Amino acid sequence: MDLQNHIRNKLENAIEKSGFGTAVEDYMLVLEKPKQENFGDISTPVAMNLAPVVKQAPRQIAQRIVDQFEIDPYYIEKIELAGPGFINFFLSKKCLQNAVAQINEQGRTYGHSDLHKGKSAQFEFVSANPTGPLNIVSARAAAVGDVLSNLQAAIGVDVEREFYVNDAGRQIRLLGASLNSRYMTELGHDEPVPEDGYHGHYLKELAEELVQNEGDKYAALDKEKRLEALSRLALEEMLKRQKKSLQHYRLQFDNWYRESRLRQKKAHLKLLDLFKEKKLAYEKDGAIWFRSGDFGDEKDRVLVTREGEPTYFLVDIAYHQTKYERRFDKVYDIWGPDHHGYIGRMQAAMQALGHGKESFQVIIVQQVNLFRDGKVVKMSKRAGEIIEMDELIEEVGVDAARYFFADRRLSQPLDFDIDLAKKQSDENPVYYVQYAHARICNILRFAREKELEPDEEALSLLNNESEMSLIKKVIDFVDIVEKAALNLEPHRLTNYLHELATVFHRFYHDNRVVSEDAALTGARLALVTAARQVFANGLEILGVSAPENM
RNA sequence: GCGCCCAUAGCUCAGCUGGAUAGAGCAACGGACUUCUAAUCCGUAGGCCGCAGGUUCGAAUCCUGCUGGGCGCGCCA
């Protein structure tokens, strides 16, 4: 909708003509949605922001701006000065009614814009170690990462989703050793799982399958060869299962970037050379250090240990460097709260490599506490007691899981109430929104049976309170998507859809869509068609299904 | 000790780049179905916005200190 721009332009003109042109700054030109409906549809506190600068009373300033404001009656019905100095705009009915036709014309693309067209971004998220099934924490990251990606795409960004696979190093060796124990035990040899190995049930199951399908084939190998073979096998199997879980969760990664690929190319060693060359690295106590302290980190960090092993950090820097080589304008990492201490050093590394501060952003998504029967479900990774993502999805469904995960501020720890998410009742917000969509589909089906169609020529018949509220709500969608995308706040979208559902349900209660009045029926069908489109488009961004009946 | 996150209605949370009377869902209570879906709607009740200062025309929002809770501070990954 170019409505906001229209008002902004006219407002700037009015301010210019009032003689405040030199005093006004961009940040003062705020257009917001007033809390109360009787304060109009759009409001600006610009006069109050100008007051301290021009040293005049806010209401006096506002009055002069209002006097100079050129009203285009197509858009605006009236302007009011209110309260301490707010200028409130009331939109014309004509403009609101026509918005319905515009939405229907845009259809599936309504809500999308080219605000950031031409930019590219990469989201790296989940990136769980391939040493076991995905858990609850990954489930939140997966939902959030996917929705954030969708939101960026909606404002025109060319987005890529990436999963970084840590398929090299100590943990994979441990994984192999753990599988080896299970496998050999299955064959009657006593080889206990290493103390710091992986004790989960899944490796036991895998070992059983292995014996069943391939017998004692691996037992014949000498231990080193066997461990290597089983490591590889376990890794690929775990990866396969993770991919399957994510697919089930309706999440498609564009790229699975393997750490082993970096190591093969010796990317980390080349990077080390580069650091040395640029005097960003030095030797101390037998280890090689990065001067991260010079780039805002708390202290310097080790890149190569005294034993000559490259640290995870060194490889990770090399990995992040590839993101820039792959020419993303913006690189986002989604991490759990346990990694926040890692942000400083990675930012330092990126800056040392000459990448602008704005180009790399870490998004910390807070933890998930699982509740069942009103009690916290304790999870212990060591003992292999984790709640798997598959179990959660199995139990509550993909829609509820994704909706719940998107419905919180990222910085807020999330209490996930399994019992609530499972409930097919009004206590569950997912159904409330989906039900609104299904209800509209039902109306449209009913109308089609009677051979009635939406009629955009009749939109001027939409006049009553609940009709106008619904129109005003659907036209907010573009703005909501933009704000959610720019601020990386998926919960804005769920909140909005819930509000939209409320307004729609009220409209439904107040008005019969299919009635004796053919013209009015056409107009209302056009309105609910637009509303349905907004539900569908919004739910699509969330990755939640929009059922046609419930 | 240092760093990050959190504290708003009984519960779960919005609102936080300062603005008008702090909102929603659930739970509680009272109403509404011969109509296109009652998985819905309407109404009532519910608040020292953790505490104490500060900044200013104005603070849930910004700053400082404190209290309480979660997490992190490896030549681990």
Image (cartoon, helix red, strand yellow):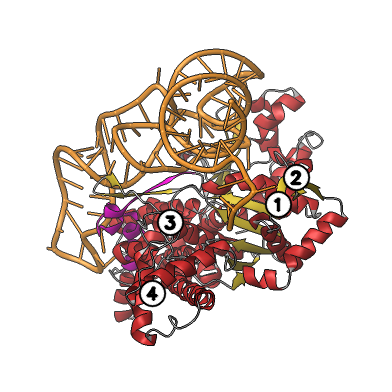
Q: Badge 2, how many Cα within 10 Å: few under 14, some, many 20+?
A: few
Report how far apart the C-alphas of labels 2 and 3 lie in the structure: 30 Å
Above or below residue A442? Residue A50 is above
Location of mark 4 (residue): A183
| Tag 1 and tag 2, C-beta contact below 8 Å | yes
- Residue A285's disc is 2
For the residues tagged 1 and 2, is the chain the same? yes
Location of mark 3 (residue): A195
Location of mark 1 (residue): A306
For the residues tagged 4 and 2, is the chain the same? yes
Above or below residue B14? Residue A353 is below
- Residue A9 makes an appearance in the image: no
For the residues tagged 2 and 3, is the chain the same? yes
* A424 falls in the magenta region: yes
Q: Earlier in the sequence, mark 3 or mark 4?
A: 4
Q: Where does the N terminus of chain A fall, quadrant-wise?
A: bottom right
Near-viewer residue (A348 or B61): A348
For the residues tagged 3 and 4, is the chain the same? yes
Q: Amino acid at mark 3?
A: Glu
Residue A122 sits in which quadrant?
A: bottom right
Q: Residue at x 24, y 57 (%)?
A: A425
Relative side of A23 to A75, left or right = right
Q: Amino acid at mark 2?
A: Asp
Relative side of A352 to B23, left or right = right
Report how far apart the C-alphas of labels 3 and 1 lie in the structure: 25 Å
State the extent of the magenta-drawn residues as a range.
A412-439
Q: Earlier in the sequence, mark 3 or mark 1?
A: 3
* A443 falls in the magenta region: no
